[in-house]
Image (cartoon, rainbow, N blue to C red):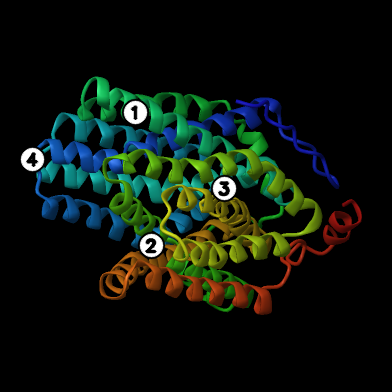
Amino acid sequence: MTQPEQPTTRGDQRPPSEKSQRGLDWFAFFLADVQVGFGPFLSIYLTTNKWTNADIGIVLSVGSIIGLLGQVPGGALIDALRRDKLVATVAMVAIGISALWIALSPQFLSVLLAQALHVSASVIIGPALAAISLGIAGYSLIGERLGRNARFASCGSIAAGAFMGLVGQTFSSQAVFYVTAMMAVPAVIALRAISSDDIRRGHRDDPPQEHYEVIPAILELARERTLLVLAGCVFFFHLANAAILPIVASTITMRVGEKATLLIALAMIVPQIMVAFASPHVGRLADRQGRRWLLLLGFAALPIRSILLASTTEPFALVAIQLLDGISATCLGVLVATCVADIERGKGRFNLALGFVGTAMGIGAAISTTMAGIVADKYGSSTALLLLSVIALIGFIICALFLPETKNTAAPEGRRGCDETKQ
C-alpha cells in the first residue's frame, strides 16, 4: 500500500497528528474488510446451509429496509451525541458480534436478528466515520481526507474479497464469518489511535448544542435548496447506476458461461482499483479548485458508460467500459459528502444531512434494479441500458443547471475570506 500523503495546512488550521491520520486510514481499511463479509458471501453461506431463495431474499430485504429507514436517524444520533469515537467503537463491536452470530447459528431467526444488528450498526458507523473525518481534517481539508478514506476502503475491499474468497474455498463459507468477526478487532484498535482532541478541533465551526431536536433540524434541511438539489442528483444517479452491473453480469454469463465469474470479478475490481488510486487526488483538487466541475465529470461518465454498454455484448469490451464506473465512483464517493459538509458548515447537522442524501441514494438504488429488470426481460438488455442512460442524463442536467459551487459558500463570516485568500 502506498505511503499516505500528509494534508497541506491552509488558513489557520494546523494539521492533525500523524497518528490520528494513520488511525483513520486503517479504520477505513478494516471497516471495508468487515463489510465485505456481509456481501455475496452471506448468500453463499446461507445457500450451503440449504436455505431457500425465498428465505435468503427475506433476510436481505429486511436488511435493506432497515438500512434505508435508518439513514436519517443514524445521522441524527451522531450529531446529537458528538461522541464519534465511542459510537463508532460500539457499532464496530456490534458488527463483529453479528458476524459471529451468523457463523455460530445459521438458523432463520438467528440470521434475521444478526442481519438486523449488522445493518443497524452500519447506518451508525457510516456517519461516525464521516464525522471523525470532518473532525480530523476540518472543513477546509475535508475533500482530501475523504479521498484518503476512499483509497483505504477500496484497498480493504479488494484485499478482503480476495482473502475471504480464498478462506471460503480452502475451508468453508462459515469460516468467512469467523474472519469477518476477527477483522473488527484491528478496526477498534485503529479507532483508539485517533486523538479525541484532533476530532474536536475540526468541529470548532459547529455551534455548541445542549439539546438536539431532530424534527426542527429535519425541517431546516427541507428548506435548504442546494441540499435538495444535491439529493435529487444523487437519486437519479443511483436510479440509473445500481442496475447496470447486474445487467452486465447477466450479459457476460450468457456469452461465456462458466468463465463469467472471473470477468464479472474483473468488472467489479477494475473500478475499485481506480478509486484507490485516484480518490486522494480528486479530494485534493476539490479542496483547491472547487467541487462542482469534478461532480459534473462523475455524473457525465454514467450516461456515456450506459450507452457504450448498450452498444456491445463483447465480454472484454464490457469489462473495459467499467473503467468509466471508476470515474463516477471516485468523484461521487469523495464529493457528495464533501458538498454536504460545505452546505452544513457551522450548522451542527452534517451527519443528519448526510443521512438525508443517503436515503435518496438508497431509494434510487432500490427502484433501479426492479425497474431495469422488468424492462430488460420485456425489451432486452440494450433497451434497459439506454433507459438508464436517459435517467443518468437527467441527473447530469440537474447538476449542471441547478447545483452551485459549494466550496466556501457556507463558511462562517470572518473565516470565509481567510479560506478563500489562502487557496
Q: Which residue is mark 3?
A: 131
Q: Position of residue 353 (x, y in %)?
A: 54, 63
Q: Earlier in the sequence, mark 3 or mark 4?
A: 4
Three-letter amino acid code of the residue under disc 3 = Ala
Which sits earlier in the primary sequence, circle 4 or circle 1?
A: 4
Q: Secondary structure at mark 1?
A: helix
Name the residue nearer the viewer: 347 or 248. Answer: 248
Instruction: Provide residue 391's location: percent of width, then percent of height.
Output: 48, 75
Marks 3 and 2 close (CB-CB < 8 Å): no
C-alpha separation, residue under disc 3 versus residue under disc 2: 30 Å
x, y percent for residue 70: 37, 58
Q: Which residue is mark 4?
A: 50
The residue at the point 30 percent across, 23 percent down is 167
- Per the rendering, the mark at residue 164 is 1
Query: Real-space Cα distance between discs 4 and 2?
Result: 28 Å
Amino acid type for the residue under numbered disc 2: Ala
Q: Quadrant of residue 335?
A: bottom right
- Cα separation, mark 3 vs mark 1, equals 29 Å
Q: Earlier in the sequence, mark 2 or mark 1?
A: 1
> Alpha carbon of mark 3 to alpha carbon of mark 4: how far?
41 Å
> What mark, if any, has residue 243 been given in the picture?
2
Is 400 on the left-hand or right-hand side of 181? right
Camera-side mark, 2 or 1: 2
Viewer can see residue 81: no
Whether label 3 touches label 1, CB < 8 Å: no
Q: Residue at x 21, y 39 (%)?
A: 44
Q: Could you tell whether 329 is left or right of 289 in the image?
A: left
Which quadrant of the figure has residue 359?
bottom left
Q: Could you tell me which residue is drawn at 50 percent across and 76 percent down?
A: 390
